[in-house]
Image (cartoon, rainbow, N blue to C red):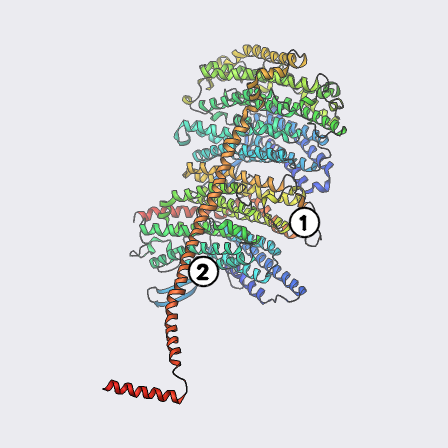
Amino acid sequence: MTHDTLLILSTIILLLPLLGFTIIIFWGKRIGATWSGIIETSILGIALILSIIVCYSKLFTFASEELIQIKFTWFDFGTGGIKVGIGLDNLAAIMLIVVTLISFLVHFFSTEYMKGDKRYSRYFAYLGIFTFSMLGIVLANNFLFMYVFWELVGLSSYLLIGFWYEKDSAANASKKAFITNRIGDLGFFIGIMMIFFTYNTLMFDEVFEAIGNGIFPFDSTAFLTATGILVFCGAIGKSAQFPLHVWLPDAMEGPTPVSALIHAATMVAAGVYLTARIFPMLTAGAFIFVAFIGAITAFIAATIAITQFDFKRILAYSTVSQLGYMIMAIGVGAYTVGFMHLVTHAWFKACLFLASGSVIHAMHHALHHLHDHHTDPQDIRNMGGLRKKMPITYITFLIATIAIAGVPFTSGFLSKDGILAATLAFAHLSGGGIYWLIPLFAFSAAGMTAFYMFRLTIEAFHGKPKIKAAAHTKENNFQIVAPLVVLAILSFWIFYSINPFDISSGWLYQKLPAPTTVVPAESQWNHLLPINDKILETQHNSHSYANLFEEEMHHQHGSAMILSILIAGGGILLAFAIYQFKLANPDNLAKQFGKLYKLSFNKWYFDEIYQKTFIGGTVLLSKLMAIFDNYVIDGLVNLSSLITRGISYFIGHFDNIVIDGLVNLSANITGFLGLMLRKLQTGKVQTYVIFVIIGIILLFYWLW
Amino acid sequence: MFTILGVGPLTWITFLPIVSMIILLLIPSGRDEKSKMVSHILFRWLTVLTTFLQLLLALAIYFNFDFGLTGINQQSTMQFVERVRWIEIQNLPLLGNLKIDYFVGIDGLSAPMVLLTAIVCFAASFASFGIEKGVKGYFAMYLLLDTGMMGVFVALDFFLFYVFWEVMLLPMYFLIGIWGGPRKEYAAIKFFLYTLLGSVFMLLVMIALYFAVGTFNMFDMMDPSKYDPSSILAGADTFWRYVAFAALFIGFAIKVPSVPFHTWLPDAHVEAPTPISVILAGVLLKMGTYGMLRISWPMFPDAVRYFQDYIAFVGMVSIVYGALCALGQHKVGKRDFKKLIAYSSVSHMGYVVLGMAAMNPEGMIGAIFQMFNHGIITSMLFMIVGVIYDRAHTRGLDDFGGLANKMPVYTGIMAIAFFGAIGLPGLSSFISEFLVFVGAFKTYPVLTIISGSGIILGAGYMLWTLQKVFFGKLPERWAGPWDPTGKKYKHDDLMPVEYAALVPLAIIIIYLGIYPIPITDLMNTSINHLIDFVKTTGSFAAHL
């Protein structure tokens, strides 16, 4: 297939879900709910087939392993323009399948799961716009498109979390998700501004080339580190990394298939994908930051998952923890296994979520049947014994659980093992010390993952039904279980590597583009720099041993594998011991570890702390500002008008009383005089005669 | 340039509303119910027709516009120019020969504003259908206001500019003061006095410039060689030039409005009737920033460069402070929908000021594009408030909830405006905000990063409002239909007239969000010339 055909097909894949969205939004009422679902699902089916064709052609038949792309100017401002475009490399081609397959299965699943919802067709429209945006992220070959689609997946996530917006908790959760993401996105955006300021372009390849030529923001590699970290902030938000992970568990308010698609398999992995995309420009400092964020997230989320009771929340924290794994993998330099974990995790986590959807669906119906509207269908304390009632759901869930726990012969084992080896290699090569914390966090999180996942499985599926409703559940029909089966099958190792113990021999590993770096040697880890002469010496195949790190990873592989099997096995055994065989009472354990238990159960108090500090602070500040504006600034305006009015009042009165008073006074005096003199005019001759006589007398008196 | 009946299109577009106003005044209002109703329909549709013709003219101007001409400081590169002597008085004491031209023309700076004015006036004329009181007077005032606004954007003679500026003020005062809400007198007088204060500053500077140059021609005022060397405004970087610039800036900043001159806006918006809020936010606010770019920047390039940092600071403060005040609305006093949008306008116009201060193509084009987009989006927001106010007779944010189920189409259209205000990619304001930010970052990295918090706060108050009004449960009192008689509102969702006002604006927001070139290319040449002009003239004058 030629360059152009591939790009045209990719564009069609990108636009198909948007077409579905447009059809349903404008004509959804006319075509009816059922048909909306069918149309959107079949559109995704077409997109999936096209994606498989594109991916196969790109990976195996296309001549070049390189990125193929088109660029065009979106808008310009006279002295330059903003170029954007789409590109397809092996990374994007694989992601295309991940996104379209999961999206298709979720669509298929939803046709049954969402049946009877009053906004059924709207739901499919939202899924359509989400898939479009997610594919946009996959195909973006520049920071701007990345950001554009980044925000659009945020929007679709907002719409879908708040899909049942009549519930306040759903509306709150969607708002929280959007705003928390915006905080991370602000960092991303500042990073983009820095890149544009420095390089006047936002294309990935052009920026990397310029960095390779020694151009840095503000002429300093420190700012290059800062730029990398700022862009990574976007990933912290979207991939729910510490400290912005708080939105993801709340996002479980959305419909369960949505949780599977957006908040487990694809959108939250976009952060990992972004970090993989900017891998070449990350400096040693940025890598450390990324690695620690990932490791801390993996650890904290795993500790929280241990004590939760909500089926979906346990899975949500598990997602956060696994995303931390991927981020950590990229941070230590193992970009290939990090991305592989994204792929394998997408299948088994989607499987887990859809299975949870199947369980909740069944529980919901059973409760409904019993006219019980108060019991929480998601609480694992209300389940138990579902194994016999829902065998297919149980088996698929179990397979995915084994995969996420990292048991050999599963996909999860392959990728997780690679990551653990990478953390060991990193700690080893970077000179140890504090860097040993990363493998420590990674291994302990692996143990906890095995523990809490089996705790969940045992509590929900094994034993006896804990309430009546759990005994009344029954297996769901074809549309719900078929996707589970597909995803469970994909959780086996065979699809990624023939050898179940070594991922690097698999086709997927070899087809992923080799990690590169454009950062100058002095601000990069030595072991991440390519060593060209070494490639020739130890060349087993075309991609291995690009640098010291890969070599060391290979060395550490054996010990990492044995350690990880031991730890995962320990976690699983512990879960069985406590929950299946009741060798210890969980409530007593909780009491014994009182403080730790509370810390974990209350999610390390993140929400409370944020509520008190950031949210409370902003609200207080805004309140103060509103008061300030109302009373001080506007007060000054009103005061000035008051003063003016006061002055004019006085002047008015002065005018009225004093000036006009003087005028009136003079008039009054005249009038008074006139009044007085008028009395003389009596009209009687006698009076006048007397006046004449008095006058003559006075005259004489005066003359003499 | 094309002409209609021998008169240029700019004269037509400016004075067409006046012609209609005269016709409208000749139509009797009618005494009995029936003739009253007929006359009301006539008044409404005459206004719609007028603004529609205006819109057609604006489009004709747009399609005949030469994107390659620079404009800004030369008459020869301005387009659709019409120039005739208007006032001429010989041998006046002190003033000498007073010459004032009727001088209009547009370039890439004013063309988007002319288009915006035509679009907003057309949309707002539909929103005016709800006016029941003094219909004749209302529409007469509305048309006069239209002429005043259009005139401001096409005038190239400072005196003419000032005349239009004041012409627009008067009908606005009456429109708020007569057709407004409970505190309309207070709001109207506050608006009037505030704007008048700005006008006084402008008048003083205008007279000073006239004494320095000897004409009211804007282009002469931009040419340092035309200045009388003995006048106080001659030269560059002098004290008096700084004072004149500052005075002019305050005059325009009141209109924008920039913090701390903004408090007239929340009151005016809250009290004004819906269509007047629309025009106020959609067009009037842009006059402030337009005036800065048309007058302050090219006439005082030296002072712009001197005050640049302070202007950027004002922009930053407006962004953050406006956003915080909008957010604080849900905590203080009566939570009024319109007041919230008014404060969001303060914040969004802050982006414009920040972009203008950046003085590079990205920032400047972003700023003008933001003026355009804010005009469209905020117009929509006010109409959206108007829709529920007409039905529920309240704008209190606490009085609502769950409207999404009652009015689904309305909610869908509303979401476009809301997310436009948040700056979501795919909608026009994203591109303008993006340009403003990347441009401003080149000049003021720190201020820009602080301004970035406005993005988060903006999402905060907008989504909070969205949730409060549209999500959650519908309060008991709105459970029934809006209008049980079914006379005015046949169903709960939007009426055709409201569609006519809202849908075109929504289409513009989406279209320009995906394909912004029609507007950005319109201004590219002129704005780049303006930046060059300000930069080179500033340095040239400094070396005089």
Amino acid type at circle 1 is Trp
Q: Is residue A153 above or below residue B432?
A: above
Q: Quadrant of residue B199?
A: bottom left
Residue drawn at (65%, 41%) of the image: B402
Instruction: Give amino acid for label 2.
Output: Val
Closer-to-camera residue (A520/B87): B87
Residue A410 or residue A91, whichever sits in front = A410
Residue corresponding to mark 1: B482
In the picture of the structure, the residue carrying the numbered disc 2 is B163
Circle 1 sits in a helix, a strand or a loop, which is it? loop
Residue B365 in picture, x, y percent from top left? 47, 44
Q: Secondary structure at mark 2?
A: helix
Position of B134 with respect to B483 (left or right) is left
Task: Looking at the picture, tell me which residue is in the foreground, A446 or A216.
Answer: A446
Image disc number at residue B11: none
Outermost residue on the left side: it is A704
Is B96 left or right of A54, judged from the image as shown?
left
Q: In the image, residue A209 lies at what x, y percent? A: 46, 29
Q: Are marks 1 and 2 in contact (CB under 8 Å)?
A: no
Locate residue A575: give its quadrant.
top right
Q: CA distance from mark 1 to mark 2?
A: 45 Å
Q: Position of residue A360 (x, y in %)?
A: 70, 26
